[in-house]
Amino acid sequence: MYSLTCKSFEVYFKEKIIGFQSMKNAYYFIINPASNRGNNGVEKKIVAFFKNRDEKFKIALWADGIKVEELVNASKEDGYNTLVACGGDGTIMEVGRSLMNSTQTLGIISLGSGNGIARHFGIPTSINKALKILVKNKTQKMDVGQVNDHLFFGNIGLGIEANFIKHYQRERIHGIKGYFMAAIKALRTYKYPNLSYTIDGETKNVHPLVFMLSNTNEQGYGFSLTPSAKTDDGMLNLSIVGRQTSWRIFTFSIEMLLFKRPLRKKMIVNQLVNEIKITSPFPVQFELDGEYFSLSKKEAHIRVLTKAIDIVTP
C-alpha cells in the first residue's frame, strides 16, 4: 500500500489529496541506508507516525547510483517544503547543501554514529521524538561553512582529526568501537603538517595536532572542542592544539572520549573567525562533517555563509 518502485530506488508515501493544496507542511524523507541505523525499521516508524495525520510525506532511500540532487529536485517538483535528512552528519551535509538558496527547510532524523549536528540542536536519537519535533515546524536560521567549493554544516578539521576520519572510513566499523580503533591508528600514523594560516591579514605558521574550525558546539558522541560555538553568529570557532608528547596525547584522548572532559585551556588556542586562508606545502587534506577529503590544491579558503539555510529545531 505504501510502496512504489521508481528509477531503482524505493519510495514510500502517503497522500491525502483532498485539501492538500491548502496544506502548509509536506515532508520528504531521504534515508541513508548505510548509516548506523539506516536499515533498522526507520521507514516503518515514519509510516506509522503519519498514519493518522494529515500531512503529506514521502520516503526515498539514498541508494548506490542515486544522487541526492535527484531526490531534492523530485521533492521540489512534487511540492514538498521540508526535506528531512535521515542519517549522520555526512547525510545532513549532502542534503543540506542542495537546499542552499532554496525556500525548502531542512529537517533531521539522526541515524549516524556521532551525530554532532543533531546533538548541537538538541534533536534526540529517538525517531518518534525527532518526528514530533519535526511536525511542530519550529525553524531557525543556520550558518553554513564553505571551504573552496565544498560546504559544511558542522566542522572542518585539518589536523589529526582528518587522519582519524580517514581510518574510521577504512575500518567500516560504526559506533564507539570504530571510533577507538580509528583513534589508535590515527595516533600511530599521524605526521604533523606544516600549515600557514592568515586571518585579517596576519599570517602564522603552525605544526598542529588539532586544527579545527567548527560551526557547532559538538563534534559527536558528546565530544567537543568548541562548547560555546553558535550556528547563527556568522562566525566559526577555530581550535588549535600544537605538538604534544605521545603520553599527553594518550591521556587527553582517554579523558575526552571516555569521560567527555574538555581540553585544558593552556593546551588549546580558540579564536572566532569568519574567514581564513590556509596554505600547505602539500595538497590539503581534511575532514568535513565526518567525511574525508583531499584537495588537489595547496590552499584552502574557508569562510562563513551567514544564516544560509532554515533548519527545523526543538
Image (spheres, rainbow, N blue to C red):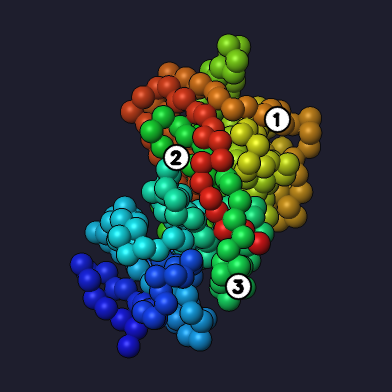
Q: Quadrant of the C terminus?
A: bottom right
Q: Amino acid at mark 3?
A: Lys
Please tell me how crowded label 1 is: few (under 14), some (14-19), or many (20+) other residues with Cα within 10 Å: some
Mark number, residue 270: 1
Q: Is residue 89 above or below residue 229?
A: below
- Pair 2/3: label in front: 3
Horizontal relation, residue 312 to residue 72: left or right: right
Front one among 194 and 152: 152
Quadrant position of residue 150: top left
Q: Is residue 104 left or right of residue 307?
A: left
Observer-side mark, 1 or 2, equals 2
Question: What percent of the width, then of the height, locates residue 269?
Answer: 71, 28
Task: Kindly identify which residue carries mark 2.
Answer: 151
Asked whether the beta carbons under mark 1 and mark 3 sit within 8 Å of each other, the answer is no
Residue at the (32%, 73%) spot, across then down: 11
Amino acid on which the number 2 mark rests in the picture: Leu
Front label number (1 vs 3):
3
> Where is residue 284 drawn, in percent x and y?
43, 28
Residue 251 visible here: no
Depth order, front residue of 35/124? 124
Q: CA distance from mark 2 to mark 3?
A: 28 Å
Q: How many marks?
A: 3
Residue shown at 61% from the left, 67% from the top? 136
> Quarter of the image containing the N terminus?
bottom left
Q: Which residue was labeled with disc 3?
A: 132
Q: Position of residue 200 (x, y in %)?
A: 60, 15
